[in-house]
Amino acid sequence: PEESPEGGNRPAPGLPLPAEGTPGIRFEKVVKRFGGNVVLRELDFQVAPGERVTLIGPSGSGKTTILRLLMTLEKVDGGVIWIGDRPLSHMPRGDRLVPAGERHLHEMRKQVGMVFQQFNLFPNMNVLRNLTEAPVRVLGLSREEAVERARRLLDMVGLADKIDAHPSQLSGGQQQRVAIARALAMEPKVLLLDEVTSALDPELVVGVQDLLRDIARGSDLTMLCVTHEMHFARDISDRVLMFDEGQIVEEGPPERIFEAPTEQRTRDFLQAIL
Ligand code: ADP
């Protein structure tokens, strides 16, 4: 996609125009190391506003690290991540970017929601509290507004009757639906999905995937998804990035990547997982 003067980006041709205010994501020469292990080496890529992108690639190639950086659960060692026209963990000072303070991080975090492989619900809170806690504390919603929002979302994910349940009383699929509702309760602009069905019993996978597909198609969220499930990747994404050793090997629409990959590493990877 072409860059706009504001430093954001425009959707690729053919994508629906997102509602005003939906930011894209841009990695600019991002470096991430763990000790001597350089996981991302000056990585550049972008996701247009409202675009849905899936990252595929071998285990250990850096996909989860990308999502964790976007959640500010990890810090970059070089380069800049942009959410729309704002740097995620930097602030402009004069003509330079300097590491951002807590206040800026707090503002930026509100824009990004994530659904994890292991659900990560608060085990000591019931479903309603899981959904209302952050909207009240972080967004400053009144309790009534938060409860009303939680009810609407639980309805959408088909769990209105579980509002008082504790996570331990729910199946994995139900817990993941609650986790999806919890992420959406923050009304993020960017939604990150990290292997969201890989901890589920096989019979529960499709229901959760269908829910996410409907959310993806029915919203203007910018989405970045990591998955090994190729039919899900096809369902949910406008574009697939094949990733290996911290670099993009190949990218394109899902049909092209899955049916006619041009790179040997993509072919090997797809063969290994299918
Ligand atoms: P993927 O999601 O593609 O499987 P990850 O992003 O989880 O890959 O991991 C990429 C590399 O970074 C791996 O070599 C992994 O061991 C390393 N790594 C990830 N998180 C940490 C961490 N917290 N401490 C040390 N090494 C890590």
Image (tube, rainbow, N blue to C red):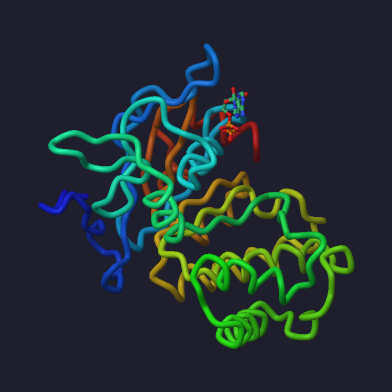
Where on the picture, by quarter, is residue 270? Answer: top right
Where on the picture, by quarter, is residue 212? Answer: bottom right
Q: Quarter for ligand 1?
A: top right
Q: Is residue 166 left or right of residue 134?
A: right
Q: Is residue 273 left or right of residue 125?
A: left
Q: Position of residue 199 (x, y in %)?
A: 76, 50
Query: Which residue is drawn at the image coordinates 28% and 43% (left, top)?
Result: 91
**For this rendering, which residue is in front, 53 or 183?**
183
Whether 213 is drawn above or below 104: the answer is below
Whether 78 is drawn above or below 256: the answer is above
Whether 106 is drawn above or below 64: the answer is below
Q: Position of residue 41 (x, y in %)?
A: 39, 22
- Residue 71 appears in the figure: yes
Query: Which residue is drawn at the image coordinates 46% and 36% (left, top)?
Result: 242
Q: Residue placed farthest to the top in the image?
A: 36
Q: Is residue 127 left or right of residue 102?
A: right
Quadrant where the image shows the C terminus: top right
Whether 63 is drawn above or below 106: the answer is above
Q: Residue placed farthest to the left in the image?
A: 5
**For this rendering, which residue is in front, 193 or 213?**
193
**For this rendering, which residue is in front, 68 or 90?**
90
Query: Which residue is drawn at the image coordinates 47% and 40% (left, top)?
Result: 69
Query: Which residue is drawn at the image coordinates 66% and 77% (left, top)?
Result: 157
What is the tally of numbered marks visible in this picture?
A: 0
- Residue 46 appears in the figure: no
Q: Position of residue 173 (x, y in %)?
A: 77, 64
Q: Position of residue 234 (x, y in %)?
A: 51, 56
**For this rendering, which residue is in front, 109 or 152?**
109
